[in-house]
Amino acid sequence: MSEIFDILLTASFWAATIRIASPLIFATLGELICERAGVLNLGIEGIMVIGAFTGWVAVYMGAPLWWGVMAAMVAGMAFGLLHATLTVPFGLSQHVVGLGVTLLATSTSYFTYRLMLPQVTSPPKIEPFQPLPIPGLSDIPLLGEALFSQTALTYAAFVLALVVALVLYRTPLGLALRAVGENPAAAAAQGLSVTGLRMGAVIVGSGLMAVGGSFLTLSAFSSFFFEMVNGRGWICIALVVFGAWRPGKAVLGAILFAAFDALQVRLQQTGIGAIVPYQVFLMLPFILSILALVIMSRRAEVPAALMQPFNKGER
Amino acid sequence: MTGTTQEARDIVLRLDGITKRFGPLVANDAISLTLNRGEIIALLGENGAGKTTLMNILFGHYTADAGQVEVFGKLLPPGQPRAALAAGVGMVHQHFTLADHLTVTENILLGTQPLWQLGLGLGVARDKIARLSADFGLAVHPDAKVSALSVGERQRVEILKALYRDARILILDEPTAVLTPQETDALFETLKKAVARGLSIVFISHKLHEVMAVADRCLVLRHGKLVAERDTHQTSGAELAALMVGGAVPELSPSTAKPGAPLLMLSRVTTPDAEAAPGLKDVTLTLRAGEITGLAGVSGNGQAALSDLIGGLIRPESGTLELAGATVAAWSAHDAILAGIARIPEDRHKTGTIADFSLTENAILERYREAPFSRKGWMNWGAAEGFARDIIQTYDVRCPGPDARIRLLSGGNMQKLILGRVLEPGPKVILANQPVRGLDIGAITFIHSRLIAARDAGAAVLLISEDLDEVLKLSDVVHVIYEGRLSPGFARGSMGPADLGLWMAGQGFDHAA
């Protein structure tokens, strides 16, 4: 047990937690926006892959890092447009379309990567985002290194969470978005365009998922390789539920999951790691997340019209 | 100033030659009408007469195939709810269009502001809502979530929504269907206040006494056509009813009941609360042979628990059930059917029928495992079809044939098939939950007379209905259910609608044992 406390007291553990949480925060917020508008976006896993790939390609070809992020966002929005078109005006099954988008986006990324670099065995690296210590704040012991010596993209994730929360709860746009996810007929009766709002939400949300994916290549691993997203998209779907469809709680959930992840890596290096097979540690964040999900989401208010297509004028 | 221009200024709404078809059905056939400033007109008609369709066209939910809508002298572009709202038309839908997880204020604000604006201005909105609440007598808490409100309160929110947008014309679609008599009176007070302030109101209903009480003019729709227009003080309920149906309305006058032995007895039964509705609280109820027991109450007060209990879908937490003198311990839906309990479910689409099954399949849905419909594990479709044909003939089910899918039938014919399905085996107890909701007068009369006939043949009937008129007309004994508790039984004629309304609002229960 003392090993765990030792780990919890190191700044590097907390810094890693925040770093691991960042892509999850982007993608979870993206999924949250979609679901608040009533659309389950299972394309998230593939959209994160296309985001990771597009961002990396852009920078590899010589674009500045922020352009890479923008390129990832545009690619994500394109797949978001595909998802939205099929699920909103056409009203097709959101499960089937989502899984289809995931398969399409993932294989498009891998295929293009192979076309571009047919012979490569070790993936080429790019120069990633560098830590950007915030003057003053980064000198605070423990907290400074954990929170205020991160990359610009990590700061952006937390700022984004605040922006999403403000838009959702403090602007007419947010109210309209929540209303189409709760009762689209009510929104339509007030003269709002359910189709427009839902499509907009899916497109913007998909853009954010792709930014989350690009964090992996542009800030975390500095290269693109197969299986790099590795189920993070599915975790984000669970995090939205964990956060009861609220941005603040969803960010907390992402940090919690990231902490388990950072913890298991460090635990493998300790005495416990010598006895317990490492696969058990790999399972740890998922098992603990499931437990937390069970406890946290029991009283959650699911958007009432989630996964319900809306057709105007139907009898 | 001539008379015509004076008149033209007072007309706030003009519908001209509105026609709307749904496939082969002509829902609205060249309907023209006008509404004056400060006037309440009633739009009367049976279900399917085209009232709601007409109002949905006016409000822009549907686009008319022909005809035009003029509000305050300006042509309204078709198919745009936003344009109708901007022109000052507010609609209170029959099925409320509120988002349950949002607050009252959020629901009212929805769509009133430009989307791309920072801040919601909740403070200003609250003030305006408070002012409107006071002016029109529409008390409701602005920060309550809609899911926590009663049906009456939700309707007030709907009306506030329209008033908040400065609506000058209010359309109310069957507003009293879900209200207690007291809530209905309060609604009428609100409408009178609104008219006094120069608003104009279209009131859609099929309850004649309400129309007579509140409207200045009545317009009667039948089969999509406007068939008559009457000043309220120059007509009578009987005339309007005849106009709605297109002929004289048969009067139903049940003979005096001859109550027999108790068939089903509930003693001190309590059931667990469900998510949205309360369970039963210490309910004692006796259903006697040859008697119709009516259960009045606002929906969501434990009616579902009672009908699920008797139908065998849930079990009591405490208390006992006795059927014909024998205590029933475990009781499944299948046991209930075999024991002679006939169920007419509340929702014929959701739990009463399977839409894509044929009439034959639906007719044997409750007994397909029994002889003669199946033997030794094999279906006998011949017997099943014969049974369906019998029902179709005896119960006057209008349909293409026993092989037709039941979704093609109208509500009334669907309900007649269900009625035949449960009455043919000669049940002991009949559980009729909202048996005529949404049906036209012809079907209502048919189903009511069959229930009375079953009573006279010695069955115990439990009639659950939100329609107080229906309960009072048919029941030999009336109970009121409120938050899972049951009032004492009141004999026929001992209580008027107003008295029962007080019980429906929960008064009297504190003193009752």
Image (cartoon, coloured by chain):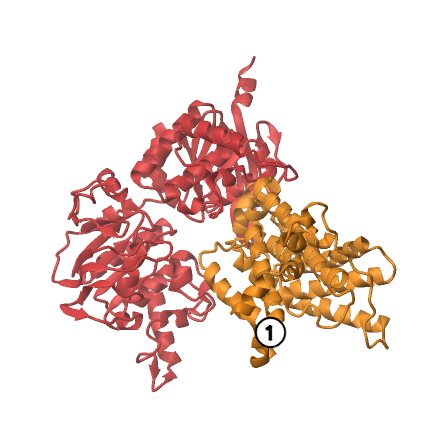
Chain colours: A orange, B red
Q: A253 or A48, which is in the foreground?
A: A253
* Rendered location of residue B484, percent (x, y): 27, 52
Chain identifier of the residue bearing label 1 in the image: A
Looking at the picture, how far across and down is residue A271, in whole percent?
58, 76
Camera sees residue A16: yes
* Residue A138 position (above or below residue B353): above
Query: Along the line of sight, which residue is nearer the eye, B175 or A33?
Result: A33
Indicate the quadrant where residue B117 lies.
Answer: top right
* Secondary element type, mark 1: loop
Residue A307 visible at all? no
Q: Residue at x 55, y 47 (%)?
A: A179
The mark total stands at: 1
Graded by Cα atoms within 10 Å as few (under 14), some (14 to 19) or many (20 or more), the crowding at tag 1 reads: few
Instruction: Tell whether A99 sits left or right of B412.
Output: right
Q: Which image quadrant is residue A85 in?
A: bottom right
Q: Is residue B400 above or below residue A132?
A: below
Q: Please, is residue B139 above or below residue A127 in the view?
A: above
Which residue sits furthest top? Answer: B1
Residue B108 % position (x, y): 51, 38
Residue receiving disc 1:
A270
Residue at the extreme bottom: B376
Viewer-side residue, B117 vs B70:
B117
**Quadrant of residue A285 in the image?**
bottom right
Residue type marked 1 = Thr
Q: Where's residue A138, x and y in %?
A: 69, 50
**Picture residue at 52% right of the left edge, 31% below the top:** B123
Residue ID at (51%, 40%): B106
